[in-house]
Amino acid sequence: GASFTLPAKTANHVPLGTEIDSFEFRILAVNATSMEVLFATDSVIQYLPVLNVNDPPTLTAPLRVNATNQVDFFGRHVYTIEGVHLEDSKDRDVDRVRVDIWATNGTLSLPTDALELADFSDCSIRRYSEWRCRGRGSRDQNMTFVATPSDVNLLLERITYQPYYKNIADTITVRVHDGMDHDCLHSLEHRMNGNEVLSLHNGCYTVDTTIAVWTPMQLGLDDNDTNLNVPKIFGIPISAIVFW
C-alpha cells in the first residue's frame, strides 16, 4: 500500500520523501510499593521500515473506437484511442512494468511528446528470459516497452491507429506485466533505479484489455479505390482473404 517506507525512490530515481517510522523506549526498575524508579537504561530508538508489497494492477479501456475525420494519403481513416488507463497508484512508481500493444490489420503510434518516457532500448537485448522490447512507438504493428505506471498512462493517453487498408475490422490489445521474473522484469532490472531494497513481489501479475476498431467491411471495392497499395483479388484486399 501507499504507507510503505521502502523502496525510498521511484524507478525514475525520484525520492519519495518517506521517513522510516520509529519508536523510543527504555527499561525501568521500579519499587513495587513506592513506584520509585530504582534504575533506568538509556533510551533506545527502534526503527520500523515498512517494505512495499507489489499490488496487482488493473487496466481499463474503451470498448470500441470509431474513425476520426482525419484520413491519410490513401483515403484511409485514422483512429485515435483515448481512455486506456492503468491503475497501480499504490506502488507509487517504485517499479517499472512491461507493456505489450499490438494490432492485426494496422499500425499503432504513441504520443510523440511522451515517447521519451518509454524504454525500448535497454530491454531490447535481454539475457534474463525470452521476451524482448521491440518497436519504437511509431507506426508499429506490435510494440513492447518498459515504463513506470504513471508514465504508461501518459503513453497510453492517446494511441493513434492507422489501418493497412480501408474499411476494416480489427482488435487492439494492450497487456501489462507487473512484478518480477517470468514475463516481468528481472530483479537486476528492477535495481536499475539504484534502490538497494526492492518491493516484495508475489510473482508476475498480467492484465490486458482489448479495443475494437470497426467499420462495415465493403467486399466489393471500387477499381477507383484510392488504396491502391494493397493487392486485391476480385476487388477484395489480399490481407482480408484466408488461404488453406
Image (tube, rainbow, N blue to C red):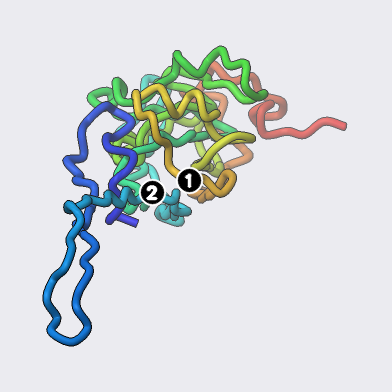
**Residue 156 appears in view:** no
Across and down, in percent, residue 8 comes to 27, 37
Residue that badge 2 annotates: 52
Residue that badge 1 annotates: 200
Q: Which residue does the image show at 64% across and 19% down from the upper left?
A: 231
> Label 2 to label 1, Cα distance in Å?
6 Å
Pointer 1: residues within 10 angstroms few (<14), some, or many (20+)?
some
Q: Nearer the viewer, residue 86 or 172?
A: 86
Identity, as a three-letter code, of the amino acid under mark 2:
Asn
Left-right relation of 212 to 28: right
Of the two numbered discs 2 and 1 on the same chain, state the one appearing first in sequence: 2
Quadrant where the image shows the C terminus: top right
Q: Is residue 238 above or below residue 61?
A: above
Identity, as a three-letter code, of the amino acid under mark 1:
Leu
Q: Is residue 3 above or below residue 178?
A: below
Across and down, in percent, residue 190 comes to 45, 29
Across and down, in percent, residue 142 comes to 54, 27
Across and down, in percent, residue 177 comes to 52, 41
Pointer 2: residues within 10 angstroms few (<14), some, or many (20+)?
many
Q: Which residue does the image show at 64% across and 28% down from the upper left?
A: 237
Q: Nearer the viewer, residue 40 or 81?
A: 40
Q: Which residue does the image show at 51% across and 39% down from the upper left?
A: 167
Residue 93: name its quadrant.
top left
Residue 156: name its quadrant.
top left
Residue 37: name its quadrant.
bottom left
Q: Do labels 2 and 1 touch, CB within 8 Å?
A: yes
Q: Which residue does the image show at 50% across and 24% down from the upper left?
A: 188
Indicate the secondary structure of the residue bearing disc 1: loop
Indicate the secondary structure of the residue bearing disc 2: loop
Q: Is residue 108 above or below residue 29?
A: above
